[in-house]
Structure formats: C-alpha cells, structure tokens
Image (spheres, coloured by chain):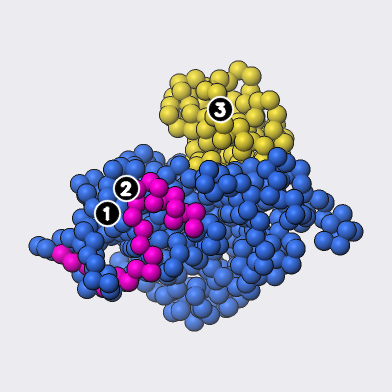
Amino acid sequence: MRTGTVIIGACQAGVQLASSLRELGDTEPIVLVGEEPHAPYQRPPLSKAFLKGEATADSLTFRTHEFYSEHRIELVTRERIVSIERDASGGVATAESGRRFEFARLALTTGAVPRQIPFDGSELEGVSYLRTATDAALLEQRLASATDVVVVGGGFIGLEVAAGARAAGKTVTVLEAAPRLVGRAVSEATSAFYLAAHRRRGTRVVLNAQVTRFLGQHDRVTGVQLASGDVIPADVVLIGVGVIARTELAEQLGLMVDNGIVVDASALCSDGLTVAAGDCANLPNPSLTPGGIDRLRLESVQNAVEQAKVAAATLLGLPAVYSTVPWFWSDQADLKLQIAGLSGGHDQIVLRGDPEAEKFSVLYYRAGQLIAADCVNRPLDFIAVRAILHSGQHLPSDRAADLTVPLKKLALPAALAVLIGK
Amino acid sequence: MPYVTYISATGSETAVAGFAGDSVMETAVRNGVPGIVAECGGSLSCATCHVFVCADSVFDPMQELEDDMLDGTAIDREANSRLSCQLKLSDADIRVTTPETQV
C-alpha cells in the first residue's frame, strides 16, 4: 500500500504545506519536489534586495537543511515532474529524469511562469524575465554593465526593478500597454500617483505603449521599437507582463482548470482527492467582506501560506475553510505600498493624506462598507484597515479622511454599525 | 555563534544557533520555530514577527517605521516589544518571548 504525501513545487506554498502537515501530526513520509537547483527561497526580494546585491538564493532560503531532516521532509531539487498517474488510493509522479515518486496523497504547488511575448527579437541576449533566483542572478549581472534599461510592463515587478535600476543611476524607461500603471491591482488614484512618483525620480514612463519588436546587433538587444516608430535604446529589457499558472500536470490528471487549477474553499481539486495551493490555484474569493468577484487567483505570499495551511488540513481529512483579508505589498524606491482587501467593485473612494507628500491611503467602499485600502507610506492605516476588515467593524466614510484621528480610533464595532444602519 | 532562545506564550523554550548579522526573525523562520509568522519576509510590511525582548538582551534602538508598525500587532505592544525582523544578532546570546498570536 502506498503511503505519504508528494508535494510538487518546492516554493513558499510547498514548504508551508509540508511544515503544516508535520504540525498537524502527520507522521507519514513527505517528499517536496522542485525543479530549481536551490532549496526553497523567498521570491519577493528577487525584484528588490536581490538586484541590489543585498540578498542571494542562500540568504533567502526559508528553512535550514536541518529543519527538513529533523521534520523528515525529503527535499528533492532539480527534478521536474512530467507525468502523474493516480487513483483514489494514490499514485506515482514521474520526473523527466525517470525518477518515480509514489504517494498516497498529492499536493500541487506548481506556481506560475512569466507570460512571454512573442515579439521579433525576444531571443536576443539581454531580453530578460524575472521569476526565479536564477533569473534574478542573470538580470543582476546584465544590469551591472547596462546604461539603458527598458521595462516592458508597468506592474509591480516591472516598477520594482525600474525603481532599483533608476536608483543605481541607469536610464530607465517603463513601457505600459494600458492607459495606466498597475491597472490590475489598484485604482486610478493610486496608478496616477505611481506615474508621477516614478517620473519625479527620473524614470521615463510611456503609457499606451505598443511594443512591436526588439532590435539587436550581434545577437544582443540594442533597443525596443514602438508602433509609433520610436526606438528606445536598451542594453537590458525586462519583460514583466504577468504570469500564467502552471496547470500542465493538473490537466494531465483531468482536473478542472480555468485560469489556474480550480479548487474549492478547502483547496481541494475537482477530483476530490488532490489539493492545490498558491499562485497556481483558482479559488473561491476568500475575502471576509461580502460581495466582489466570485473566483480568482491570488499571487501573494500570504495566499501561498494561508491556502497551503488549509490544503494540509484537507489532505489529512481535517475540516478547513480558507477565509482571510487578502493583502499585498510592493516596495518601489522609498515608497512602501501595502494593500489590504480586494478593491474590485468599489463604488466610493476616500483619499486620506496627500499623494504629493508621498504619504496617503486610498480607502475603497462598496455600498457604504469599507472593502479595501491602498496605503502608501502609511503603515498604520494599513494595519488598521486589515484589523477592521478582519473583525467586520465599520469605518464611517465621512470621517475617514481626517488625518488628525488614527483610523483605529474611528472604527465602530460591527454590532453598533448595524444599529445605526450602516 | 550566538544562541537565540524563543520562549512561547505558554513558557516552552526553543534554543537555536544563529549567525551574527542574521535577524531574530530569520533565525526563527529558518528553523521552523513556531510563534513567528513573518509573512513579508522582513520588509517591515506585516507586523507578524512581534516579540518581547527579555531584559538581558540588547539591540539597536528602533526606527520610526518599526515603532509605527508595532502599534498594529495582533497582541498589544508592551515596553519591550520589537519586530524581530529588525533585530540583528551580534555574538551575544539572546532571549525573546513570542506572543500568543501574530495574526
């Protein structure tokens, strides 16, 4: 009879899942398999501290080797799983090398890969993507000798890299196809702020930019051509236009896949046996505030960790339902953005603080109820909003802009909010 | 090699060998010490690595942002509260207590 768990994807979610299985008392074998050469490490610093030379794959590792051995978690690196067969009693996952991993229970924490753009010239030396420590090391090396840096995509990754390169004295251009920056994650007010803030720091930002091809000489990138005919010189191009969930193995297993591996609130896949967690999973909106989008993928550390904990419990047959206040962060230059909640479907915005002073929060309301906030260099607002959303308290919108009162003090208990009809 | 002793809210102690220059948070997380969550990996964004520093342990004074974030910890701050991601180890042994919860 097969025993134990195989976790595919040695990443934030994978490590958490393995650790949580042990914390929950699982004594069966656990194998954590990853294709990268490194022990699992934190990804968020790759676009920040790593490129400044302040971190390495080693310094970013989640756990010591002793931790894995003490907790009898077999960490397998450099093995890419290419096929899985399973039935209700378990199965076997086979790596490219031919190595086989038998399991009774299976977890997929396969993550995501950067979306590629098939432009002419994409193969030129200097055209980069950023997802892994290997990618980051290559980008760091390329940036070191670069003068002109072009970032395609004005999302978090692109803007973080742009800010770092600019601070290091490079000429930096950000090309965004949409009419505003970070359109997927924040509202117009926050987008407009980031546009101004990056420009103030000397980064050139082109909105509505249509890249047509990458130009090169002797197999090295030399520039980026836009539909307008403009050519922007480039020694390094970073493409950061989002990620695609890795669902190949799930598809092979016949699991339901729709922008990620479809799971329920217990992180269970459509076969009722396999669990999935992290960037690869398409999950029911776990947000504690009612309303908003039904299903989504969440690309965040918090989601990887919290969903993996739920997945571990589910694998062991323990009841667990994932609900939380989703939160995200992005550090760009000296701007600390913290986002609490999901702002989709808001019908009212309250601006608290002064964007010109680079210290403000955008509070999002739906039907009079606070649902989310983008906080720039206002960590106390962030902490307060997260707590308010967690506890179901009410934050009156007509007072939320008053900087003389901490948000924490403005919050009304949920019961009182009901009484006054809010 | 400095030793860091983590005392849980219920009084159980975990001692871990650390490295000078690493933070008290990193040392805990790498060794799987329960009681420190550290969702943001040490970028002063989440306030989930709150500790109470024992009287015999000394660290550099805190910066403004850490001070602000400490107002938002799950368990209310006390005079000896710090965010352990900001506590760098030297060669001295250290003792900290972890709160009942971080989130």
Query: Chain letter of disc 3?
Result: B
Tell me which chain appears yellow: B
Residue A238 shown left or right of residue A344 in the figure: left
Separation of residues labelled 1 and 3 (CA atoms): 36 Å
> The numbered mark 2 sits on a residue in which chain?
A
Q: Does the magenta segment cover residue A358? A: no
Picture residue at 34% right of the left edge, 68% below the top: A209
Residue A115 image position (x, y, % from top left): 37, 69
**Residue B62 marker:** 3
Q: Are marks 2 and 1 in contact (CB under 8 Å)?
A: yes
Residue shown at the point (34%, 51%) measured from the top left: A203
Q: Residue furthest top?
A: B56
Alpha-carbon neighbours of circle 3 within 10 Å: few (<14), some, or many (≥20)? few
Question: Which stretch is magenta?
Answer: A192-216
Q: Amino acid at mark 1?
A: Val
Q: Chain of mark 1?
A: A
Quick check: marks 2 and 3 in contact, CB under 8 Å? no
Residue type of the residue flagged with mark 2: Ala
Which residue shows up at 62% across the image and 26% down it?
B53
Colour chosen for chain A: blue
Q: What is the x, y in percent for residue A107?
A: 52, 65
Tell me the number on the disc at residue A277: none
Residue that carries the numbered disc 1 in the rendered image: A149
Q: Is residue A33 visible?
A: no
Discs 2 and 3 carry the same chain letter: no
Q: Which residue is mark 2?
A: A165
Secondary structure of the residue carrying tag 3 is: loop
